[in-house]
Amino acid sequence: MRPLSVIVVQSNAALTESLANSLNRHFRVVKTAPDLPNLRDCIHQSHADVAIVDLEVAGVDEVRRLKQEFGGTTIVCTHRLANEQMWAAALAAGASDCCYSSDVRAIVLAATNTKFLAHTHAA
């Protein structure tokens, strides 16, 4: 499912670029944001389908605010040490999943499965 647009923000620029490069083959448009304020601007301007947000950049409360502000955007949380507690907290905040920052397959599945289900239920 390639027609999604994605914005990536991670805890450092190298990780952001690395993840964005890995996601380029899976999504139509992949943009990066250097920080949370720029992420908000990018989501607003591009009407992004998915935001991939490192929990080191935005805590769970911020994820909740992002989901409230951009209800149509799927939020996929990442963390270098993702665990069950983070996963539960991220889901409770409205994220579709919480994955290891390096697990591109899980990130793609979280982004595409959520959007696929939303389109299926809307039809």
Image (cartoon, rainbow, N blue to C red):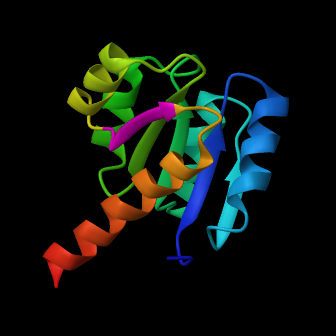
Residue 10 vertical position relative to residue 55 in the rendered view, above or below: below
Instruction: Tell whether 117 sits left or right of 53.
Output: left
Quadrant in the rendering for residue 80:
top right
Quadrant in the rendering for residue 100:
top right
Instruction: Tell whether 84 sits left or right of 103.
Output: left
Q: Residue at x 69, y 22 (%)?
A: 11
Residue 102 vertical position relative to residue 62 in the rendered view, above or below: below
Q: Which residues are magenta?
A: 95-99
User: Residue 86, percent across and down?
Assistant: 37, 18
User: Residue 35, percent across and down?
Assistant: 67, 29
The C terminus lies in quadrant: bottom left
Residue 78 vertical position relative to residue 75 in the rendered view, above or below: above
Q: Per the image, is 119 magenta? A: no
Residue 112 vertical position relative to residue 19 in the rendered view, above or below: below
Q: Residue at x 72, y 44 (%)?
A: 19
Query: Which one is in front, 8 or 112?
Result: 112
Instruction: Tell whether 91 sits left or right of 42.
Output: left
- The kind of secondary structure the magenta stretch mainly shows is strand
The tally of labels here is: 0
Farthest residue, direction bottom: 123
User: Residue 23, percent across and down?
Assistant: 68, 57
User: Residue 121, percent across and down?
Assistant: 14, 74
Q: Residue at x 41, y 18 (%)?
A: 83
Q: Residue at x 52, y 60 (%)?
A: 48
